[in-house]
Amino acid sequence: MEKKVPSIFDYNDFRKFLKEYQTAKRSQDRRFTKSTICKLMGLPNSRSYFNDVLNGKHVSETYIERFITLFGFDADEARFFRVLVRFNQADIPSDRELLFEQLISLNKTPKKILSKDVYEYYTEWHHSAIRATMETIDFKADYAGLAKRIFPAITEKKAKESITLLKRLGLITPDKEGYLKVTDKSISAGSDIEKELLIQYHLKCLDAAKATLITNRTMHQAYSTNMISISKEGYERLKKRLHKFKSEVRSLTHKDEHPADRVYQLNIQLFPNTKQEKKNDQK
């Protein structure tokens, strides 16, 4: 069955696009193999370049342009593809954030991706902090006082903008006495592009954690880091326990019989500090 050639605007991973583009084109023409792509890109003696890129090989500016020619992109598609490749290959958080903002502005089908308000919510850590703070205070319009409660510090202007955003998203609403309180509504993070937003959000939260650790050691805090060596099976068990712990945290806060009077940020990171060597028997 022939497959429709995908649109680059539907992707936030250029390698995924390359793979699905080649699969779609080959469903239309069996001769459109990975080796054929290499030849069309001016690499007649290389049969593996395309496959190497799919497996993580860095794509230079020269070959970005060759891909654009191969796909026959128009000007808008070409601009989006260039930024997407640079975004996927960026390893500096500030560069990723800047490139991601460019992706959002260049995307020609934003309604399929996410709303501008959701994007704004995830790009700043203090929006979720202010949302949680609404459960601990009776707030109406004291933006200066609200800004002073947040740590690391934010401006009164940012506090006001955050409240406006949270209202617009339906995440806070006035109670019977006019005080803003949290609703039960949550933001979905199901699409691939929203997952990229979550990465940016986590980076902002980690920055906030660093600021708290360095500048305000008198606050009640609990930091712990464990460097562990573990098997694949042990890692899977640990992930399940962490998932259970996160569920317990949500349950504990939901069932807390006392009124909330403070806001805390709980970060959990589990990531590799070494590269996994492939065993000889692994395919």
Image (spheres, rainbow, N blue to C red):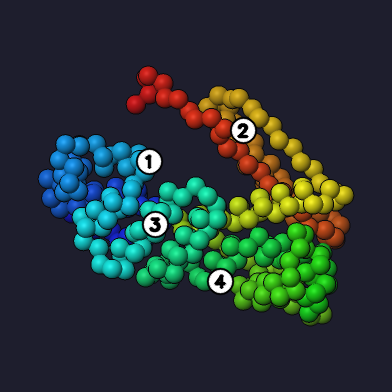
Q: Is residue 25 left or right of residue 207?
A: left
Q: Who comes first in sequence, dot 2 or dot 4?
A: 4
Q: Going 19% across and 52% down the picture, which residue do you hit?
A: 25
Q: Who comes first in sequence, dot 1 or dot 4?
A: 1
Residue 62, image x and y in percent?
28, 51
Separation of residues labelled 1 and 4 (CA atoms): 33 Å
State the SS at label 3.
helix
Q: Is residue 43 above or below residue 109?
A: above
State the SS at label 2.
helix
State yes or no: discs 4 and 3 in contact (Cβ < 8 Å): no
What amino acid is at disc 1?
Gly
Residue 277, by quadrant, is top left
Mark identifier at residue 56: 1
The count of marks equals 4
Q: Who comes first in sequence, dot 3 or dot 2?
A: 3
Q: Going 36% across and 43% down the picture, which residue do you hit?
A: 58
Residue denoted by label 4: 117
